[in-house]
Image (tube, helix red, strand yellow):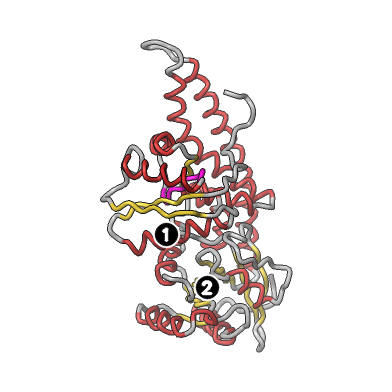
Amino acid sequence: MSRQKRTIDLSIKPKKAIVCGVNMGNADDTEISLDELVMLLANLSIPTVARVIQKRNTPDPASFVGSGKAEEIKDFAQKSEATLLVVDDFLSPTQKSNLQKLTSMTVWDRAFVIMKIFESRAHTSEAKLQVQVAQYRHEIPSLKGLGHQMSRTGGGIGTRGPGETEFEKHRRKLERRIKSITSRLEEVKGRRRDSRERRKKNGAFTVALVGYTNSGKSTLLRSLSKDCGILAANQLFSTLDPVIRRISFRDGGSFLLSDTVGFIRKLPPELVAAFRATLEEVSGADLLLLVVDSAEKDPVGNMEIVLETLKELEADDLPRIIVLNKIDKAGSDADFTAMELRARGEETVKVCALTGEGFEDLLTAIKKQMTENYEDRPADEHA
């Protein structure tokens, strides 16, 4: 094995992809998830030429899909000149290896695609470190199969083959890198914690924007703060580093509004763990604005994915306001979604982050939360 630094290879960009999923009983969820995967690939400039769905109770433990379906994929790939097969789930090293052999294609899973996007969006040293440690954690399990394969190249019963030794060396090297990066990220975590505590002592009321990726969180922050320097791109995971701005009320007082990384279905746990220092800006907030794209196919489903991730961060019990965004695109669908959410007891405000429609209602709702729940913490002008 080469002694050079080895990370997940994120440089290859095949021209055409086939996406593949397993329908285990909910066809709508499968379709929505595949739609998302196609969009993820589009963010990497990789076009999708076909979607393949196999209906089965559970994915095949050996190759995710059955050998017959894999053969169909191989035949279509040859006709369409597709070179990449992307599976809409997490693959084990065995499944990936077998699927590559069965289809003669490069095989990625959903986690790998999301990792690629995160890497392309990481511009600060902190974000790059967080992505790097997630990559290393993702890579270690895949090395186990490699270690078994390499160990067959030498060594008898009761001995250690040279391949196994090389595998263990590389695994230890990755673990040392993870430990080193984690230590540096702990320092970042400590500094962020100190900053939050200073803001609390100064009476600052903190509000965190959370939501599905590309729901319009950054656009909302940009419009409310009137800061044109905030990136608000129509792309997935455009924000990896926390952005905090002060928002003032017309009649006096203010609050701090922060934006951070968005969520998505099947977000790799390695990324959640790596970005915990960043995501603690959410768990340390006084109020959450859960931004929902009301023009999406399944806005409530997306909201529930966000709530599941908030539960992982122990932030699901924080006070929150559901912000139904993009009402200009959703039309009457936004009204029906708002009724459904209010029937579930969710405080809901409809807005258009681009035009500012609904901002007065949103600011009124935020101020009401501040008044009712945090009377002992005035909305003053101190950071």
Q: Secondary structure at mark 1?
A: helix
Q: In the rendered structure, which segment of residues is drawn in magenta? A: 82-89
Residue 354, percent from left and from top: 62, 78
Q: Is 273 on the left or on the right of 186, as rendered?
A: left
Near mark 1 (Cα within 10 A), the count class, few <14, some 14-19 or many ≥20, is: some
Q: Is residue 241 left or right of residue 370?
A: right
Q: Residue at x 60, y 32 (%)?
A: 6
* Quadrant of residue 308 within the rendered picture: bottom left
At horizontal 52% and vertical 60% (from top left) the residue drawn is 39
Instruction: Tell me where residue 333 appears, x and y as whole percent.
Output: 44, 81
Residue 230 vs residue 51, the one in the foreground? 51
Q: Which mark is residue 182?
A: none
User: Which residue is the site of mark 2?
Assistant: 289
Q: Residues within 10 Å of mark 2 (few under 14, many from 20)?
A: many
Tag 2's secondary structure? strand
Disc 1 marks a residue whose amino acid type is Ser
The picture places residue 311, in percent across and down from the top left corner, at 42, 60
**Residue at (65% x, 79% y) in the render:** 254
Find residue 200 and report its horizontal and vertical position in percent. Answer: 61, 67
Q: Nearer the viewer, residue 360 or 118?
A: 118
Dot 1 corresponds to which residue? 33
Q: Is residue 12 above or below residue 383?
A: above
Give whichever of discs 1 and 2 has the lower sequence position: 1
Q: Residue at x 61, y 74 (%)?
A: 220
Quarter occupied by the N terminus:
top right
Tell me the kind of residue under disc 2.
Answer: Leu
